[in-house]
Amino acid sequence: MAYALQQLINGISLGMIYGLIAVGYTMVYGIIGMINFAHGDIFMVGAFVALVAILMLMSGDLMHGPAAILLVLVISMGFTALYGWTVERIAYRPLRGSFRLAPLISAIGMSIVLQNFVQVSQGARVKPLEPQLVGGIELMRDGNFVVQLSYMQILIIVSTLTVLTVFTWLVTRTALGRAMRACEQDRKMASLIGINTDRTISLAFVIGAALAAVAGTLYLLRYGIADFFMGFIVGVKAFTAAVLGGIGSLPGAVLGGLLIGLIETFWSAYFSVQYKDVAAFGILVLALVFLPTGLLGRQEVEKV
Amino acid sequence: MTAPAAVPALGITARLRAALVDASKATVVAFGLFFIMVGLRTDVSPTGALFLRTRWLDVALLCAAVFVSRLALALWLGRRKPEVGPAWQAAALSRAGLLFGPALLALALILPFVPGIGRYELDLGILVLTYVMLGWGLNIVVGLAGLLDLGYVAFYAVGAYAYALLAQYFGLSFWICLPLAGILAAFWGVLLGFPVLRLRGDYLAIVTLAFGEIIRIVLLNWVELTGGPNGISGIPRPTFFGLPFSMSGGPQTFAGFFGLEPSPSHRVIFLYYLILALALLTNWVAIRIRRQPIGRAWEALREDEIACRALGINITNTKLTAFALGAMFAGFAGAFFATRQAFISPESFTFIESAIILAIVVLGGLGSQIGIAVAAIVMIGGFELFRDLDEYRMLVFGAAMVVIMVLRPRGLVGSRAPSVLLGEQRRIDARFVGEGRG
Amino acid sequence: MNASRQHQPGAEILRVDGISMRFGGLLAVDAVDFQVQRGSITALIGPNGAGKTTVFNCITGFYRPTGGQISLRRSDGSIASLHRLKDHRIARAGVARTFQNIRLFAGMTVLENLLIAQHVKLQKATGFGIGAMLGFPGYRAAEAEAIDRAVEWLRAINLLDRADDAAGGLPYGAQRRLEIARAMCTMPALLCLDEPAAGLNPRESDDLAKLLVSIRDGTATRSAATSILLIEHDMGIVMRISDHVVVLDHGRKIAEGTPEQIRSDRHVIAAYLGEDEDAA
């Protein structure tokens, strides 16, 4: 029981990271209907920017307390958002309205570019970072087993909820959010009523990248490693989360992220660590076969 | 006459100013991009701790490069006249293609005997032909049937492991294993095709990707059967219909039987012709089948699935045959890969391989056999050409994918050749051709 | 002429018995029944949202009705229960259809469109694909025959000179005709048309009316006479060519009969003019 509770906590904190990335996938998919294949690598860039920022603060002996972590988050969000914007500007905008597979290939190309750019500029070695936030709150004790909610997990949960609250407010309450939802419904109509669709799409990429940067920073702090290839598998799982939740649905992305996080954690804890990714993908396949539009997705009615 | 002369002069300054502003903006963005990721490099010290190394010069150089190239691009684009219609281009290309295809085939046939072609060039030829074959195989699924498959490499892996395991455990020869590998891969194609029949578009893409990864992870972790990350080594090399390529020169070897001087290049030449024959088989089947009812049904499926149903076409069977046939050719290629390398491991079957094969198909132009061959030569050959770039090679490769797509979203050959004609030869403009939603 | 196609027991080709279709809480079609007589043109009319297309989709298998039966009586007297069949089986049983928003294979040629319509027959001639791959004569003969049939239909719809052009490049009216020819190439017993005159100019509508009559009478090509069920908003065409008219409103059948009877039916007038029935 205690063990399961601990796994639940671990699963939720991992799932929140997936959820943050999944929101970026689902938002871009909702608006322009493409899989932003480079989004996982944007997450990786976010982790690297955070790593550099942390090292900078450490060299000035400033890496203490919540303010430092907040600063790292802000730096990472800012610079990673720029990457998100640039990727859209270079690889996707020229292909707007063209053949569906072209942006997909372009996105795969961009993913290769980002991975190898980071490999060249930051080196291929895995970067180990010593834990920045240790300790936690003891929730219960069962014999020798201690259920702990670590400060790191509190950080993940608190920052994810904060970021998502701001994001939800942005999408549901502001003019930008309305413009985004309008583009999602009908891009041509949106531009006819005077919405700058190019800018709205750019902003979707910027926001998505900023969320991925938060995820990257939290992932780095939680697991203490960063390498240029980390974006692929995390990205695929986050996309899985977005699809599972119903692509295009923002609450669905978070829900899907939590589910994938929980499935992965429980599978690793009770079955086998090696096959944890198989479990995540297996669930995806099953979910799609039985629920082709995901958990919270819109039913796609084929008009004949 | 002075006025018209003055206008362009004014235009030039205005354009230059606009270009300078544009280039400056790009440079500011570039600085933002490179400032942290290039300017501050994280290094691991011998003690295992991380430290930062600054490289401001590199940042300055990169920003200068961005400024200059953006300026040049802006000036060049500002000057460019509206180009001649793509229809004209496509027509010229297809006319050239009529001669180009046979010429390419002739070159491929005599390549091993062209002076100056050594072992290295032949090995490269084998690699390129493997990708040509994979591209043609995937084209059946993506280009004809319009089913977006991001896990094609899984079938390549099935073929390779099928041969390796059958040879290892049952001692079967390459020539028995080759069809078995194809059949097994086709079987897996159907097996994986079944659950995804109802899925469309990007859902199909992501599920096929997931299947590809699942197969790779299973290969990686099922150590008792597959050797896990260490792979399988000592896979038997192919024989010339029973005659091994051996340096001993005995009567039961290839060289001895034909009374030739034993040479290691015999096997390479044999492998080259083997993959050429397999690729041509793929091509022949693909071209023939396009003119068959099933091939036309695939293309119709790509154009409009609902209309197909209304015409009595069984969608399930049509999709599954496309998956199975595409997978079968990947299985053949996989068996060839295993016998050529004599060693396989899950590392050869990562997602990036699927992405490269798909990129070849899309860059070549969906459905175009010759376009795919050219794309494979350009991508794989070009990749080899940039060997000296070392770690920058993949960077250039990815950038090339983006650039080609931006310049030619429909690939090299976007137009479609009708499968049957009443009148004279002609092609269908790319703008009419569907891309499939499956 | 028209009277002879009126209700003759046992002469119906399609029987729709009390079909209902429910989408969630909405009852789109409520226990509708009607028949299509062999060799007739039957029109299904009604205001927007009356459930015409839903009935149509039930007959052609795109929806499975929540209740009721649909049976097709083939010329040999055998009966196919359409409400139990999958859509591609329905097409094979002898029901062909067109779509309200044209669904041609846009990137394929006009001729290819007509050959795909003969897929089922051609596929049988290939011998599991192997015979055709190797170029066996049996398949070649079958394909030549299929092309002959396609050419006949192209002549009938006046598109022979555009046989090798992309279907997506044809003018709108030609696309409508091609879609009808494609449906006819499946050699159906019953042809179902969903608003075939939508978007046509008066001259094209006129040609369409002639084409439909010639399909019913079997004079368009050498193929047999074919019964037609159509949904249409253009009352001019409906009244001119239909032998029998069925009127739906709010998912129920409110009237049926000859065009003359329908024209003077007060329920129909009320439904179309939106009048209150008590007032009328």
Image (spheres, coloured by chain):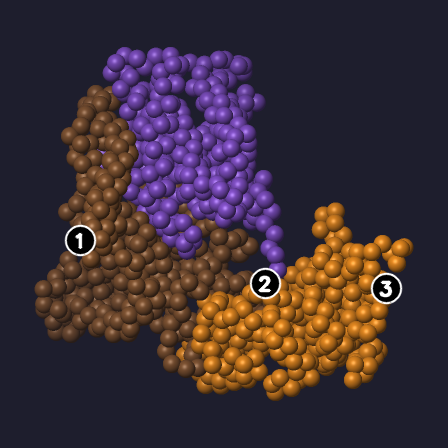
Residue behind mark 1: B385
Seen at 25% across and 74% down, the residue is B99
Chain letter of the purple region: A
The total of numbered circles placed on residues is 3
How far separated are the C-alphas under marks 2 and 3?
32 Å
Q: Quadrant of the N terminus of chain A?
A: top right
Q: Quadrant of residue A276?
A: top left
Question: Is A44 left, or right, of A175 in this rendering?
Answer: left
Specify the colour of chain C: orange
Q: Secondary structure at mark 2?
A: loop
- Residue B358: % across, % down: 36, 55
The chain letter of the brown chain reads B
Q: Chain of mark 1?
A: B
Picture coordinates of residue B43 (x, y %)?
22, 26
Label annotation for residue C208: none
Q: Residue at x 27, y 36 (%)?
A: B25
Amino acid at circle 1: Leu
Q: Quadrant of residue C278?
A: bottom right
- The numbered disc on residue C266 is 3
- Label 1: which secondary element: helix
For badge 2, the amino acid type reads: Asn
Kind of residue indicated by mark 3: Arg
If you read the primary sequence from the N terminus, does the residue marked by circle 2 or circle 3 appear first?
Answer: 2
State whether discs 2 and 3 lie on one chain.
Answer: yes
Mark 2 crowd level (few <14, some 14–19, many ≥20, 10 Å Cα): few
Task: Please identify, in this view, whether the residue under mark 1 or under mark 3 is nearer the observer.
Answer: 3
Instruction: Report the chain holding disc 2.
Output: C
| Residue located beneath label 2 in the image | C101
Image vertical order of residue C81 relative to residue B36, above or below: below
Q: Nearer the viewer, residue B220 or A98?
A: A98
Q: Is residue C101 visible?
A: yes
Residue A87 at what x, y percent from top left? 34, 40
